[in-house]
Image (cartoon, rainbow, N blue to C red):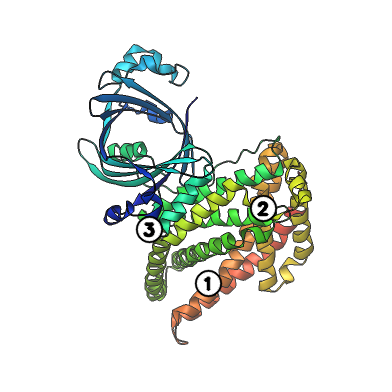
Amino acid sequence: MPNETELKLRIAPEHASDFAQLPSLKAATQYEPKSLYNTYFDTPKHDFLQARIGLRVRHIEDKRIQTLKTAGTSYGGLHQRQEWETEISSDTPDYSVLPKKVLPKWCRQQDKLKSIQPVFTTDFTRTQWDVSFDDGSLVEVVLDQGEVRTKEHRLPLNEVELELKAGSPLKLYQLALDFQKSIPLTLENHSKAARGYGLHHSQPLQYHKASRLNLAVDLNAEQGFEQICWHCIAHLQANEDMVLYGQDIEGVHQMRVALRRLRSAFSLYKGLVPAETNKWLRDEIKWINDVLGVARDWDVFELTLKDAQAVSPHQPEVLNTVLEKVNVLQKQAYIDVREAVRSPRYTCLLLTLGQWLTAKAWQESIDKKMCSKLDHPIQAFTSTVLQKQYDRIYKKGRYLTKLVPEARHEVRIMVKKLGYGVRFFSELYPSRTTKPFIKALSSLQDGLGILNDVSVAEQLIAQLALSDDEPARHFLAGWYAHLYQTHLTDIADVWDNFTKQEIFW
């Protein structure tokens, strides 16, 4: 069964001419540029797309190459999928040469097969290099320049693909990071087919919450760590388009949640994957998380101000001036976020993180005893780490309503870390035992989050530099004082409910 492993990167058209001059490619085997014209096929209802299959016929001079690809996986720009290529004699697909088990069952119906038609095309010039490494690894590097077309629309196509032909996938990251030193490249998580379908039938941008993480009970602790990290990266990158091009503030929120989940994974696993093995990554993750955090704080503050206006119908104008100031700062925060997500620094973080995970780089700096612990069953690790985190929360939070805000914030961070942990590992246990605990934990996290929002709001109000005699200043002081006291009173009952829940691990 053929597999394709490749790393996709976007390149700006103005940098394409510089790409061929990169030192890594000077010593490589270069081929003559060739024109590639590809037609992608599907039914009017996009049945292939729904089955996560791509089918195309490629024109290379007088040859016709049919390619069928499955969706596979895409993490950190690294695409892994199954692929079947066959030379055929016509411009339309020849289904007889395709593996029968790969095609959906509906392909056995002749009426369905007859409904398959061209959906979009890609037309580009490909420049190709073969890069060899001392360990025998071979990477095919291609620069594609052209466009994706439907009958009504066109989309420029400028990308670099690094496909592993032999050896270690680490070489893909190594090359990409090397390229990144000279030319600003960004990760491309959408295939040409995905962009073609998007052009053919555009859909509104959507934000994405973390999907279910199904860890298998036969995994060891290390395998669990790897799957969790890749899952967090996928969650992060799934929301990049909304942050860069969309309007829904939930995109920034979900990117931030993904980063917090990743940081929590590092923290929960620090007994097996020591912090010193990933210090640079943690610092860079904190950087992008902080940039997103500024935008998120202003988003939450704006929502609270609008809530305050809604329940104070006699004085909505009091907050109008404040909202205008907030919107200015909010707009600048989003400019900063988009600049950061488009930056080489962010791309370098994702590439380095992918390289670190693929190489299991933490193994280089731990002893045999620690390596042995990484090989222990994941449930044994889960029970230990979740219990430790629970004990810390119980000890620190017993007098939750009497704690100073700084100490209560520490409890909130612990609760969030436990929350991410139980969601990482919940599929290892029966749902009837996990759901009540997760529900109570979520209520505690939400309550502590609101109290934290009040503290953050006080800092943001200070940044607005409202004068002492401005009515909005007094209104907000009273509003947030009421909000704080109400939720501080409620949190005692929420805490009691949480501590009464049966521990499931």
Count of numbered tags: 3
Q: Nearer the viewer, residue 495 or 463?
A: 463
**Residue at the far left in the pictured view:** 152
x and y percent of residue 72 in the render?
Answer: 48, 34
Which amino acid, mark 3? Pro
Q: Is mark 1 on a helix, strand or loop?
A: helix
Q: Residue at x 43, y 20 (%)?
A: 103
Q: Residues within 10 Å of mark 2 (few under 14, many from 20)?
A: few
Q: Which of 217 and 449 is in front in this view?
A: 217
Sequence order check: which comes first, mark 3 or mark 2? 3
Q: How crowded is mark 3: few (under 14 residues within 10 Å), some or many (20 or more)?
A: some
Left of 444 or right of it: where is 66?
A: left
Is residue 503 in view from this perspective? no
Which amino acid, mark 1? Ala
Q: Name the residue under label 3.
A: 184
- Which label sits in the foreground, 3 or 2? 2
Q: Residue 457 carries which label?
A: 1
Is residue 221 in view from this perspective? yes
- Which label sits in the foreground, 1 or 3? 3
Q: Which residue is drawn at 67% across and 53% down?
A: 364
Sequence order check: which comes first, mark 1 or mark 3? 3
Q: Gap in Å between the C-alphas at discs 3 and 2? A: 30 Å
Which amino acid, mark 2? Glu
Q: Which of 210 and 215 is in front in this view?
A: 215
Q: Residue at x 68, y 50 (%)?
A: 363
Q: What element carries label 3?
A: loop
Residue contact between numbered discs 1 and 2, judged by CB atoms under 8 Å: no
Q: What element carries label 2?
A: helix
Q: Gap in Å between the C-alphas at discs 1 and 3? A: 37 Å
Q: Residue 364 carries which label?
A: 2
Residue contact between numbered discs 1 and 3, judged by CB atoms under 8 Å: no
